[in-house]
Amino acid sequence: MPCRLSKVYTPNMRPPVLDPLFAPVSTLPGIGPKIEKLVSGLVGSQPDRDATVADLLFHIPHSLIDRRHRPGIAYSENGDIVTLDVTIGRHMAPPRHSKAPYRINAYDETGQITFVFFHPRHDWLEKTFPEGERRIVSGKVEWFNERPQMVHPDYSLKPEEAEEMPAIEPVYPLTAGLSSKTLQKAVRAAVDRVPHLPEWLNYAHLHQTGWPDFAEALKTLHAPHERNDIDPASPFMQRLAYDELLASQLALAMVRAHMRTLGGVSRSPKGELQKAVIASLPFQLTGSQAKAIEEINEDLAKPVRMLRLLQGDVGAGKTVVALAALAQVIETGAQGALMAPTEILARQHYASMLPLCEKAGIRLALMTGKDSQKERRLRQEQLDAGEIDLVVGTHALFQGTVTFRNLAMVVVDEQHRFGVHQRLALSAKGNGVDVLVMTATPIPRTLVLTGFGDMDVSRLTDKPAGRKPITTVSVSLDRLDEIIGRVGAAVADGQKVYWVCPLVEESEKIDLAAVEERHRVLEHALRQRVSLVHGRMNADEKDAAMADFKSGATKVLVATTVIEVGVDVPDATIIVIEHAERFGLAQLHQLRGRVGRGDKPSSCVLLYKGPLGETAGARLNIMRQTNDGFLIAEEDLKLRGGGEILGTRQSGTPGFRIARADEHADLMEVARDDARLILELDPDLKTKRGEALRCLLYLFGRDAAIRLLRAG
């Protein structure tokens, strides 16, 4: 829930003790305008402002170099970083205009080594490595033709200056154009600016854990004494991870408390309309669907606003649960809205709900960006007059000027595409609006706590009756011709096939060419027209290609991952995912969910390019072993760590910089309980600890929650 500091708040609202940490990084030594831009791109927490000193402090080292390792030249292993006490021998400068490297011989009592330099400045080398003198040199040793060499050593110091070299050196994630020495110098200066801050942790908890204070933890991570100081389980990492998790949980709890204070409306009709919707279904509800509907009905009956997350795997029947819930509020004479992230999805929801709504007597309308001004105006008049009970559309429509006569409930599909602020804006469109959020991305429990700590959760764990499991196989790309042959046979048998090509942002042009090439090859091999969908096409071209595939005019659809979410073609039975090793587990699972939607057996072919790395191999194994999205999400969390969880940055995970969902899950639970207790005892954060917690919220960019205190 990060907020735009400088744009929204006047600086005097922030505790003055934090001012040194909110100075721009350009105030640190060695950071001019060009470097500031690089540093902001690397560590900045908000895209529309320059990085601050605090942003740099939360850029934690990922590993260490131990310069205490002094084995002597002969005992230095290939690839090791070592520190050597040597006597400098002869310089071998290359002839002028030669591209050969500059070499310097050196020796100790165990053997000889060569220091190698490319594009060197001769005068600098002669001064730094004077012949016949002793030097302490540190860098990476490589053995070449049974002789050791060191290319561009990191340090060369006189024996009396050796103390200047850090014994243990932190290694940071970097970006092109930014050297580690520049970054380290800036970080050291940033650490010196950390002020003495009031303690925001409960004293008993601090005593029990034995954690250091915030400043000591931060200083130790940037100047570690031992290798395990930066381990996720070290007290220094645990302390800062807990601080970050507490800031997140406290902010979510404050949003929730604020939503509650806005007041809800008790909606408990007889339930006749809901029964009519359920009766019009061509199948029985699953146990978890019935339970979710019951939980939502209980929420709606309370005079408190509902904020519930409905998690269901691909094809678990979330839309049916949403429609049953909407029927409850529509029966009270109010209106409902369903928001989808894309137009394709909005149209799909509309198409699947229309027959049920017609049977139950619910007046349903669709609003999309394609509507003409005249259609838009008519829909708006009908909404204002209360002639529409339920409207389906994309997010954009509800953020704009659309108004309602009496909006009581909003269902948001694919929550991870938008955040807490939009939820608050939406709620302002009606009186005590209840919010139900749906996601088809199964989210591990720890991440539900992280990103949706302000919500109650319902899970749909079983698939609707009649759905066949999907058989998953992995096949090497060497057997591509064989797979194309099998696809041809399946198409001749009347089946429909998705063929997915990966898309990597850095090389969009290459990928686009790859998709178009695959499309051409398949059309040639299958001797028939094949549909093509990719991100560079406009909406009309995509819709036309999808419509051809859906209607059966084409039997094969070649696509990039634009089909990942929500495309529904029940008679598609095969999906081929090319370069499956490039995809995350959650994304593979989402893609696989495009098939197996009808009553025919379906299969998913994972085409990979070998040899596979350990993680990629583990991913493909898990996909072969299970169709359970929740199990897959938990495994994904273990394989990736908490960074890029749930596919490509579309995750529901707030961007944590220190805490890791896989390593610090136990701390998350404690932080959640702590946040609840804090708000029970001190809802306005007025006590001494409350004032300190305000510092914490600002530090971790969660200060939007403080604005809610004022609004409340």
Image (tube, grey):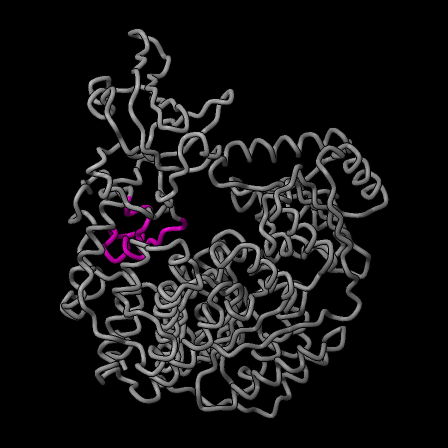
Task: Based on the picture, tell me whether residue 30 belongs to the magenta stretch.
Answer: no
Q: Is residue 292 above or below residue 423?
A: below
Quadrant of the drawing holding the N terminus: bottom left
Q: Is residue 684 above or below residue 544?
A: below
Q: Is residue 401 visible?
A: no
Number of marks? 0
Left or right, residue 662 beside residue 676: right
Residue at 45 percent across and 34 percent down: it is 76
Report the magenta residues as a range.
Answer: 39-63
Task: Based on the picture, tell me whether residue 50 belongs to the magenta stretch.
Answer: yes
> 244 or 82: nearer the eye?
82
Which quarter of the figure has residue 246? Answer: bottom left
User: Residue 164, position in %: x, y?
Assistant: 22, 42
> 255 or 135: nearer the eye?
135
User: Residue 500, position in %: x, y?
Assistant: 65, 43
Quadrant of the drawing holding the C terminus: bottom left
> 155 or 1: nearer the eye?
155
User: Residue 109, position in %: x, y?
Assistant: 37, 28
Q: Is residue 346 visible?
A: yes
> 528 or 183: nearer the eye?
183
